[in-house]
Amino acid sequence: RILDFTCGEHHLVVRTDSGALYEWGGRTWLEPHAVPIPEEHREALQTITKLEAGEKFSFALCADGTLFSWGSKASGCLAQGPDCPKIVVEPTPVPSSTFGHQKIVDIVASKS
């Protein structure tokens, strides 16, 4: 059962009642495929309060204020720093220092 979804510029991300994330579109996936969830972040990602997506990137905000991002570095929106890979395939926490160690309470995304 789908609990939440967001539409990016050319892709879609959904969260199911089992906590799984799926995405498709963006000329990469024609049908839903599971987003790989790193084991060390599985518990945090069970508490997603908001999903957002833009052009070639996706965000998941968790109840504790942790923001996860994944997608293309070329989007300029991952907030993973200059050394992140060209493509971040799994939800990766944005360093808390990015926002001055403040708790993130809301997010929005759109085309860059």
Image (cartoon, rainbow, N blue to C red):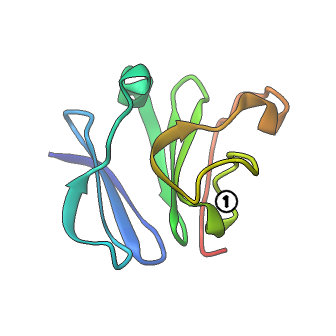
Out of 108 and 81, give the one closest to the viewer.
81
In the rendered image, residue 28, in percent from the top left (x then y), is placed at: 32, 72
In the rendered image, residue 44, in percent from the top left (x then y), is placed at: 44, 23
Residue in the picture at 46% in, 42% down: 91
Outermost residue, left side? 1
Residue in the picture at 51% in, 27% down: 63
| Element class at badge 1 | loop
In the rendered image, residue 47, in percent from the top left (x then y), is placed at: 41, 27
Callout 1: few (<14), some (14-19), or many (20+) C-alpha neighbours within 10 Å?
many
Quick check: 61 above or below 88?
Answer: above
Q: What's the residue type where badge 1 is placed?
A: Cys
In the rendered image, residue 33, in percent from the top left (x then y), is placed at: 22, 56
Quarter the C terminus occupies: bottom right
Name the residue that disc number 1 marks.
77
Quarter the N terminus occupies: top left
Quick check: 31 above or below 82?
Answer: below
What number of labels is visible? 1
Left or right of 79 in this view: 44:
left
Out of 6 and 32, give the one closest to the viewer.
32
Quick check: 64 above or below 91?
Answer: above
Residue in the picture at 38% in, 31% down: 38
Residue in the picture at 71% in, 47% down: 83
Left or right of 33 in this view: 37:
right
